[in-house]
Image (spheres, rainbow, N blue to C red):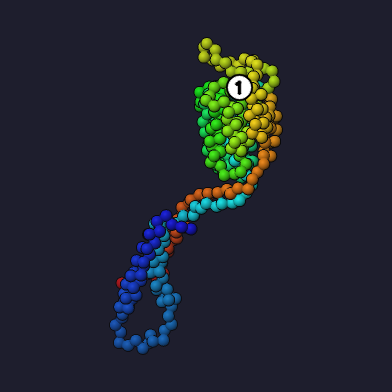
């Protein structure tokens, strides 16, 4: 336990002069009664009230002390804890272009990819993971972190339309590489999921893969889409969204080249079940020994002292006006 305002504890020293004042006061404070002789009372036994006559003062001191501790705000200590574990640095690069709304997956490619990615991340508690989204441009969704709830919350809230439409695979890889520079693990990987071909962006996918190879980063590419045709979303002249069958075009040659150049692997996911199998295989990525820092949350812990102060005060009041009542 530590205190948010430990300087308040110095106030406890005020109890010392209070105790001195009480002792001095008790020396000159005693009951008197005028009688001809006190001989008859010389051998009378002392009652329990005599021994407890200082209890009220002790309760008052305890009340003051507890209130001072409350003002110092005792807290459960926040702490960083470093543990050594086996893990890897991974960036999940997710295509969020409009074609990911195609309904050859249930309910569509985008939601199916989010669901499978969520299960994948939830099972990798020791890994340092980041999320990058790309369409016509790329964006870091979540920087590298071991905070699994934060990653899952981002995936759950991720919606289409956050980026300009298009498929900039090379830019998605480049942004992922920038995030992996922050990682400490020896094993670094990018899992890139897309359903199309590179048609925009600043960096070519092959160029980005060459940089990844130099940095020792493996890229696992996943082509999402059934064979043949799939219902793609199209906007009519009236602004309505309709789904019409269109050929599924995935640049598998480029995705294979990117993966093989970095020592990774290309996967083709034609339905949700296959996509789950792909992530299960990627789940066996090589791991390396790494240090993971865990953070514990801070919580105020003053309620016990507040209740004690109230209890001591009420007990003093009750005793003062009942069994310990004094007659002026």
Residue 106 is at least partly visible in this image? no
Count of numbered labels shown in the rendering: 1
| Residue found 52% across the figure and 29% down from its top | 138
- Measuring from the top left, give residue 197's x and y in whole percent: 61, 22
Lateral position of residue 187 relative to residue 56, left or right: right
Tell me the SS state at disc 1.
loop
Residue 11 is at least partly visible in this image? yes
Quadrant holding the C terminus = bottom left
Residue 27, image quadrant: bottom left
Front-most of residues 303 and 157? 157
| Residue found 64% across the figure and 45% down from its top | 288
- Measuring from the top left, give residue 180's x and y in whole percent: 56, 38
Front-most of residues 22 and 327? 22
**Circle 1 residue:** 197
Front-most of residues 320 and 237? 237
| Residue found 34% across the figure and 86% down from its top | 38
Front-most of residues 78 and 165? 165
Q: Residue furthest top?
A: 237
Does residue 154 lie above or below 251 as drawn?
A: below
Residue 117, image quadrant: top right
């Amino acid at each position: 336990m530590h205190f948010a305002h430990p300087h308040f504890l110095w106030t406890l020293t005020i109890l010392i002069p209070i105790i001195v004042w009480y002792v001095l006061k008790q020396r000159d404070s005693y009951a008197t009664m005028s009688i001809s002789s006190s001989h008859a009372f010389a051998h009378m036994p002392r009652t329990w009230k005599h021994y407890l006559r200082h209890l009220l003062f002790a309760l008052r001191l305890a009340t003051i002390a507890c209130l001072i501790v409350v003002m110092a705000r005792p807290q459960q200590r926040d702490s960083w804890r470093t543990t050594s574990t086996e893990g890897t640095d991974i960036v999940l690069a997710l295509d969020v272009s409009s074609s990911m709304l195609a309904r050859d997956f249930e309910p569509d490619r985008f939601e199916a990819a989010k669901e499978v990615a969520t299960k994948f991340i939830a099972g990798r508690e020791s890994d340092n993971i980041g999320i990058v989204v790309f369409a016509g441009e790329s964006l870091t969704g979540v920087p590298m972190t071991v905070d699994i709830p934060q990653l899952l919350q981002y995936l759950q809230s991720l919606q289409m339309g956050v980026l300009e439409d298009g498929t900039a695979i090379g830019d998605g890889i480049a942004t992922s590489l920038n995030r992996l520079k922050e990682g400490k693990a020896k094993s670094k990987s990018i899992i890139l999921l897309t359903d199309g071909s590179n048609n925009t962006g600043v960096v070519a996918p092959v160029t980005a893969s060459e940089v990844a190879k130099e940095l020792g980063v493996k890229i696992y590419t996943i082509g999402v889409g059934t064979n043949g045709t799939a219902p793609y979303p199209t906007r009519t002249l009236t602004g309505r969204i309709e789904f019409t069958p269109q050929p599924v075009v995935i640049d598998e040659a480029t995705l294979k080249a990117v993966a093989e150049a970095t020592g990774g692997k290309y996967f083709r996911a034609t339905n949700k079940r296959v996509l789950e199998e792909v992530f299960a295989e990627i789940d066996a990525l090589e791991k390396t020994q790494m240090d993971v820092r865990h953070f514990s949350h801070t919580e105020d812990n003053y309620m016990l002292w507040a209740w004690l102060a109230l209890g001591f005060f009420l007990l003093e009041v009750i005793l003062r006006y009942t069994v310990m009542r004094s007659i002026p």
